[in-house]
Amino acid sequence: MRLTLHVWRQKNHDAQGRFVTYSMADASPAMSFLELLDVLNEQLTERGEEPIAFEHDCREGICGSCGVMINGRAHGPEKGTATCQLHMRKFKDGEVIRVEPWRSKAFPVIKDLVVDRAPFDKIVQAGGFISVNAGGAPEANLIPIPKPTAEKAMDAAECIGCGACVAQCPNGAAQLFTAAKVSHLALLPQGQPERTRRVQKMVDEMESYFGSCTNFQECEAVCPKGISIEFIARMNRDYLRGSI
Amino acid sequence: MILDPKIPSGPVEGKWDRHRFEMKLVNPANKRRFDVIVVGSGLAGGSAAATLAELGYQVQCFCYQDSARRAHSIAAQGGINAAKNYQNDGDSIWRLFYDTVKGGDFRSREANVHRLAQVSVNIIDQCVAQGVPFAREYGGMLDNRSFGGAQVSRTFYARGQTGQQLMLGTYQALSRQVAAGKVQMVPRTEMLDLVVIGGRARGIVTRDMVSGEIRSWSADAVVLATGGYSNVFFLSTNATGCNATAIWRAHRRGALFANPCYTQIHPTCIPQHGDYQSKLTLMSESLRNDGRIWVPIKQGDARIATEIPETERDYYLERRYPACGNLVPRDIASRAAKIVCDDGKGVGHGGRGVYLDFSDAIQRLGRPAIEQKYGNLFEMYERITGENPYEVPMRIYPAPHYTMGGLWVDYNLMSTIEGLYVIGEANFSDHGANRLGASALMQGLADGYFVLPYTIGDYLARHMGEERIAADHAGCREVEQEVSERIQRLLSTTGKRTVDSLHRELGHICWEQCGMSRNAHGLQEAIGQIQALREEYWDSVTVPGSGEELNQSLEKAGRVADYFELAELMCRDALHREESCGTHFREEYQTPEGEALRDDKHYSYVAAWEFGGSGGEPVLHKEPLEFDNVPPTQRSYK
Ligand SMILES: Cc1cc2nc3c(=O)[nH]c(=O)nc-3n(C[C@H](O)[C@H](O)[C@H](O)COP(=O)(O)OP(=O)(O)OC[C@H]3O[C@@H](n4cnc5c(N)ncnc54)[C@H](O)[C@@H]3O)c2cc1C
Ligand code: FES
């Protein structure tokens, strides 16, 4: 495959960034998108140029490290697929591809395609947990949890924290990420004691970094795990209930 | 050096309880006076950091990812074992203990394994209380499955994402302690060396991966939870950033490295499809429950799978192992695949693959049942290969997956350096020569939640009131200096080759000569090749960019340099062990039927290697293994 890539290059947070064009003559349809960048980076390095910095680790769509805007869409064209799981057979020979970092004020660029997603950690630290110390847990089967409830909690818990939801949102809102964690814990009996406090603290923390949700629903469309915006409604309900 | 495993006396069932009672305690008010460094935020490191903080210690926790939640543990799919016996199928702590010792082919320490089986039940309680959404039955009780050929159903799971869910539980516990000010989380920071002063671990030297700053951190004890070293093979199922740098640097500072040659090759991975490939993807072992493995009988048969008639297929596992068939343990399944491929019967890219065929299961159970069970795995397979496994058989091939070897630790999980603890996959402790499926998650969490937090207290209590060294101590400065010089050396190389190209070459040598089967001649050759390539590495590698910025080439270059040294030790260990056991298969030592032939008389010991200086020969120390409870037998899966 022949491809033309316009890639965002930015030396560091303070530097001015710009698109640089690279043409690739030897891409294979069986490559993953990140392997395409690997091959390009090998070529750049051999030419004595600096390779493109991009984030990745598991390359199995589960760690949430990877993620770039591909032709304006977070994680690219394939639904329910993280960048590392996207393969070049989804592109056409001769295609022009624009590659950018996540676009959000809350996620400043560190270098090239790498951004700082630390605010996600802060939201979880604000209350995204159940306060139980090691050793203090009751017997696991003491509290039965109906299968549908457990399944629903699992649907929410699948979030990989990649940040695609924020990157795609015209407001740069983090509702889907926050709602996924809030709902995962609020659905389970173990999460009840701290339910109200948790949602309030997490939402307040979220609002100190991110924009507001106005229901564009773009987050759901690009989420590699298909997390439903239904969880946002659930979070809002819990939040309101706690405020009265 | 005397290797004292410090195994408590008395019957194996009572050792841990008695030991817990006999260990010294740190008074609650004094705990906050102690600083503990935990390197790694995976299941082992994250759980240890959170638990130590809950107890009152001050903790600093490091990881190389941008967030603690992304540690490689997150990628585990299949499940976690625990001896709960919820299915009433005869499981017990004793049975889990027995299975693990036998599964490890009698090369692990009984006392450690028993403790692991004992605390396994607490792990599940803990995780459920944290909100881990394990799979449940309609009655609301926890569901279990049988995994990796176990005779009982003791594996707990959360869809195909068990590691992720356990990891998030740990991350949440850790986040709670960060918020409480008890854990300082230091992400995007790589440990590049260990500070040892007066024979004791006193701190670490790190590089800030964004600014490039090199600095020291001092503490009263250091815990390494940095995972395994499968990436020595370049292509493996591990995350691309997994590295051996932390444990290798500690090894160079005096920590013995145990059983480096015990590396597990997982049988069901998607085969390599091109030279540009960056990693191999694991397909859950559960697929072997319904898939049948075969190759064409004729060598080099170029027909597509569906055109090869039944009579011209060799279901080689069912043929060789009528009792276990496709469910034989990992090491046996992997080796069998290699044998048929070496024989020219492999399928797909380069003849390195075998079929995993679901057509019988689809006929027998119907497509919806298969979809329900394996739908997400089939989707993943199709996404990666572009082939639809409902219509054509999957192609699979073994890939490096897990390393049983690691830093030697005693029963307290302390290495041969005082005050340096090693937990999770980074140590060698519980799996002997072969790990059973769903036991790594169990071990990581056992170490972090329930073992280390006790044993480290005993060490700290003995050093109560002693002065802590400062981070600008001359001993720290010296190590910082060495780290900076090494980085400078990598940056100033004038070669032309990329780090990856050299790593690939190293991986190829290891895979060919020290992979699924080994022999003396090949290993000797490999050692020479690795040494030569290592020389070449420092001359011919190119590392663009500077040290004062995010520089992924530099990160990789340092890790690969350590892999070059570790690879040689791995081969030396494999060469010295003149027997076959578990995953270590020496072609010279096999039964007439081609099975592993152990030599308990001469090799029933842990091989713990002492660093012999740069370019020097490593020194072997032996910890004899005794089996009082599970008498060694030959593993038979016929
Ligand atoms: C694809 C796959 C599937 C698996 N499935 C299962 C399964 O179903 N069941 C099972 O029991 N096991 C499974 N395993 C094995 C299991 O996942 C691992 O053995 C286990 O998770 C390791 O945990 P850990 O905490 O020891 O290390 P890791 O999770 O690897 O964590 C290592 C940590 O150390 C940090 N680190 C590493 N080096 C440095 C450094 N130099 N400086 C600073 N920080 C550093 C990393 O940032 C990370 O936080 C699987 C493994 C793979 C690869
Ligand atoms: S690299 Fe882990 S999700 Fe893509």
Image (cartoon, coloured by chain):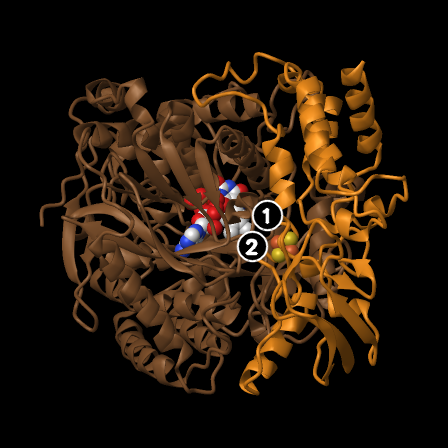
Chain colours: A orange, B brown
> Which residue sits at x=23%, y=61%?
B478
Marking on residue B436: none
Between A19 and B559, the residue placed more toward the observer is A19
- Tell me where residue B146 sits by quadrant: top right
The chain ID associated with circle 1 is: B
Marking on residue B268: 2
Q: Is mark 1 within 8 Å of ligand 1?
A: yes
Q: Is mark 2 within 8 Å of ligand 1?
A: no
The chain ID associated with circle 2 is: B
B216 left or right, relative to B271 = left
What amino acid type should be assigned to the residue bearing mark 1?
Answer: Ser
Residues at marks 1 and 2 touching, judged by CB atoms closer than 8 Å: yes
Q: Residues within 10 Å of mark 1 (few under 14, many from 20)?
A: some
> Residues under labels 1 and 2: Cα distance?
7 Å
Report the quarter where the C terminus of chain A lies.
top right
> Which residue sits at x=15%, y=48%?
B199
A104 left or right, relative to A229 = left
> Which residue sits at x=50%, y=78%?
B544
What amino acid type should be assigned to the residue bearing mark 2?
Answer: Thr
> Which residue sits at x=75%, y=42%?
A210
Pinpoint residue A227: horizontal percent, then vertical percent: 78, 40
- The mark nearer the N terminus, 1 or 2, is 2
Pinpoint residue A6: horizontal percent, then vertical percent: 76, 75
Which element type, helix, strand or loop, lies under badge 2? strand
Which element type, helix, strand or loop, lies under badge 1? loop
Q: Is residue B439 visible?
A: no
Q: Is residue B561 visible?
A: yes
Between B19 and B142, the residue placed more toward the observer is B19
- Tell me where residue A102 sits by quadrant: bottom right
Between B25 and B217, the residue placed more toward the observer is B217
With respect to residue B175, does B471 lie above or below? below
B97 left or right, relative to B387 = left
